[in-house]
Structures are given as C-alpha cells and as structure tokens.
Amino acid sequence: MAEPRSVIIDTDPGQDDAVALLVALASEELDILGITTVAGNVPLELTTRNALMMTELAGRPDVPVYAGCDSPTVRPLITAEYVHGKTGIDGAGLPAPSGSPRAGHAVDFLIETFMNREVTTICALGPLTNIATALDRQPGIVERIDQLILMGGGFFEGGNVTPAAEFNIYVDPEAAAAVFTSGIPLVMMPLDVTHQALTSDERIEAFKASGNESGRVVAGMLEFFEHYDMERYATDGAPLHDPCVIAYLLEPDLFGGRACSVVIETTSELTMGMTVVDWWGATNRPPNCLVINEVDDDGYFSLLVHRIALLP
Ligand code: RIB
Ligand code: CA
C-alpha cells in the first residue's frame, strides 16, 4: 500500500460530518493529523463535542481534536438545528465524550502543521472560517497544501439556505472567497453531486447490518438527519453530503466533474454566498476548482458501509 495520505479534516458535525469522520477514521489510506472544528451546523462547543464523540466511537482517541473559530469572519453565525437537532448529531444515542479537545486554537494547529510539513491535504466539511483565518495569518501555507477538497456550493442545483446559496458557503462567504482566490488546488463537492447521493431505508439498513456499534450509530443519525430534506424535497431519501469529500480521497473514480472558474458572491444580499460556477466557459476567468457533478451513488454507499463495518 502506498504511504498514507496526510490529511486534516475541518468540520462542523452535523450527522453527515460525523459519518465522514467515521469513514476517514476507519481508512488506513489516510493519516489524520488532526480534526479541527468550526461553528456551523451547531455552535462550536457542540461541533467540538461531537467530533470527540466520533474519535472515541471509532476507537481513535489518538487523533487530536482542536476547537477553532466560534463565529464567521465577518457575518453573525447562523446554525442549522432545524436539520441536525439540538445536539447537532441527534439520533446518535451516544454518551458525552470522556476526552477533551487539545489545548490551543485550531487555527494555530493548522498553521503549525502546514508550515512544519512538506504537504498536507485539507478536507473541509463546514464553513471555511478556520481555513480562511489561517490563510490570513500565514499566507505561506498555500504552498504546503496539495489539495483542499470541500463540500459546499451549488450551481444548477441552486442553494439550500437561500435560492442561491448552500449552507457552508452562506455561513461565511468572505472565508469562502478567500479560499477560492488563494490558489490552493480545490475540489468542490456541491449540492449538484450530493443530491445524487441519497439515503434510503435499504442503505440505512446496510449500516445496521454491520452489527457493530458504529453501524448502529450511523443508522440512528441518518434516520434523524434525513427527515428535514425528505420533507423539503419530497424525496425518499436525503443527500448525504460530507462523506463525498472523504470518498473522493479514497475512490476518486466514483466521481466526475470539470475544471471551472468559481467565484463567490460577497456583495449582493440577494445572492450572498452563491458559488458562481462558469460551467460553460462564458467568461475568460481561468479555472480555479475541479467542480464535481457526477457520482456512482451505489458505489459511494457501498464504500461507506464497508468502511463503517471495519469500526468497533
Ligand atoms: O449544505 C450542506 C452542508 O452544510 C453539510 O456540510 C452539512 O453538514 C452542513 O455543514
Ligand atoms: Ca458539515
């Protein structure tokens, strides 16, 4: 097996983040240098607590968790308890974590880690506040990041918080603009692809069939998480967003997309946080991002189920 890939996962758990964390923690192809938490789906204290619960559930308390920014760079925080429940991972049915986050701010951890290593990959599952703050404090990290894969944005699919904007980008559009103009090699998993990766009773049962605690917890979280989107979109399942980022690292051939220019709206309140994707090359703006719009959804869920089955 090739050398494990060094990654940092920046996240705002949320049930879909939690599944992504478990899949990553189960995968020996990844050397998770740390998990950095950010305010998003729920406030920072809860996203941090939830990340700790996932490292402990996975039997990986060795993976450090660092708490990051508790509010966006410019705008007030908005959260999404209406989707994720009060705790952010309603349905998990887990006790409080026994461990604590490491001392020190996530942004300091990001900067120190990037500056002391050849290259590191970032998996961004929430608002981009921590990453933009690190970029602002130490622009030199750009050369030390070989790829940043993020769940965020939408183009033909529109938005899920406003008609124009997806949650992760909408919460901190200024941070997203900083990341999308940084020059870091980007891969974007927008709603256009995550809305093709829908949960179903059969797919949730497959997690349960693992017979392990992790499979039970994943099934419980997804059974809660899917309600909001199923009602909203009148579909038989909900998009399982964030694990797409980890699945791309593990099996990139499950996905397809196109290198495009992506610019973030940070001026108009009407379209604030919109990811303006030049899919048809209407401008002469150079591509700054690989935009994913296809997924083999059966292959995706099969990967997730097999990796979760490896956990305690
Ligand atoms: O819009 C979906 C994204 O926002 C996901 O990352 C979900 O966890 C929330 O953070
Ligand atoms: Ca998330």
Image (cartoon, rainbow, N blue to C red):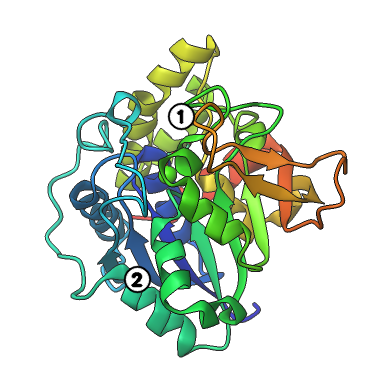
Helix or strand or loop: what does disc 2 sit on?
A: helix
Q: How far, Cα to Cα, is label 2 from label 1?
A: 35 Å
Q: Please name which of the two marks, 2 or 1, marks the residue nearer to the observer.
A: 2
Residue underneath mark 1: 204
User: How many residues crowd mark 1 within 10 Å: few (<14), some (14–19), many (20+)?
Assistant: many
Q: Nearer the viewer, residue 207 or 11?
A: 11
Above or below for 77 versus 67:
above
| Residue pictured at 46% horizontal, 42% vertical | 168
Q: Nearer the viewer, residue 151 or 225?
A: 151
| Residue pictured at 32% horizontal, 36% vertical | 78
Q: Position of residue 121 (x, y in %)?
A: 56, 70
Q: Is residue 246 visible?
A: no
**Quadrant of the image for the C terminus?**
bottom left
Residue underneath mark 2: 107
User: How many residues crowd mark 2 within 10 Å: few (<14), some (14–19), many (20+)?
Assistant: many
| Residue pictured at 68% horizontal, 40% vertical | 276
**Quadrant of the image for the N terminus?**
bottom right
Outermost residue to the front: 267
Residue 190 placement, left or right of 172: right
Q: Position of residue 190 (x, y in %)?
A: 62, 40
Q: Which amino acid type corresponds to the residue marked 1 in the rendered image?
A: Ile
Give the quadrant of residue 77.
top left
Counting residues from the start of the chain, the first of labels 2 and 1 encountered is 2
Residue 45 placement, left or right of 74: left
The yes-or-no answer for disc 1 within 8 Å of ligand 1 is: no
Q: Which amino acid type corresponds to the residue marked 2 in the rendered image?
A: Val
Q: Nearer the viewer, residue 36 or 217?
A: 36
| Residue pictured at 51% horizontal, 26% vertical | 160
Above or below for 187 versus 255:
below
Q: How many marks?
A: 2
- Residues at discs 2 and 1 in contact (Cβ within 8 Å): no
Residue 290 placement, left or right of 281: left
